[in-house]
Amino acid sequence: MTVLTEQTLNDILQYLEKSISSLALDGLDNLEINGGEEMKSFLENQFDIRLENLLISKNSSIHHLESGMKNLVIQKKQEIILKISKQLNN
């Protein structure tokens, strides 16, 4: 397994933010999700799946990140989901 740098993790998180935001906007029309908690749960699951896939492509895994990096991922995930939720409610 490869140890990721903070810059690499930040690049992955920026990509995920764009990807999840795009998914939320496109998903409203194409997915049969009632919004609210269903949409939030769907986006959180997609974030986790996409994060792990991106980490695997870098020969790493969420389980191999340092605790500080894991905390950064958790905080960023919460920020992204909250931001998208606010956009969808407006």
Image (cartoon, helix red, strand yellow):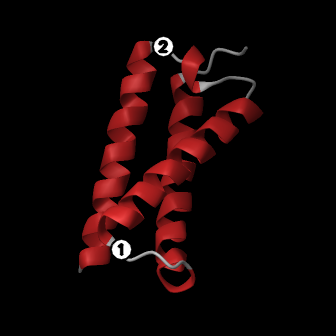
Task: Give above or below for 61 relative to 73.
Answer: above
Q: Which kind of residue does numbered mark 1 sit on?
A: Gly
* Distance in Å between CA atoms under marks 1 and 2: 34 Å
Q: Which residue is mark 1?
A: 35
Nearer to the camera, 3 or 64: 64
SS assignment at label 1: loop
Pointer 1 with pointer 2, Cβ within 8 A: no
Q: Which residue is mark 2?
A: 66
Q: Residue 23 at x, y = what percent? A: 54, 68
Q: Residue at x 56, y 19 (%)?
A: 63
Q: Quadrant of the N terminus?
A: top right
Query: Where residue 75 is drawn, which disc sits there?
Result: none
Nearer to the camera, 47 or 72: 47
Q: Quadrant of residue 64?
A: top right
How many marks the image carries: the answer is 2
Mark whose residue sits in front, 1 or 2: 1
SS assignment at label 2: loop
> Horizontal placement of 31 versus 78: left or right?
right
Task: Give above or below for 11 relative to 38.
Answer: above
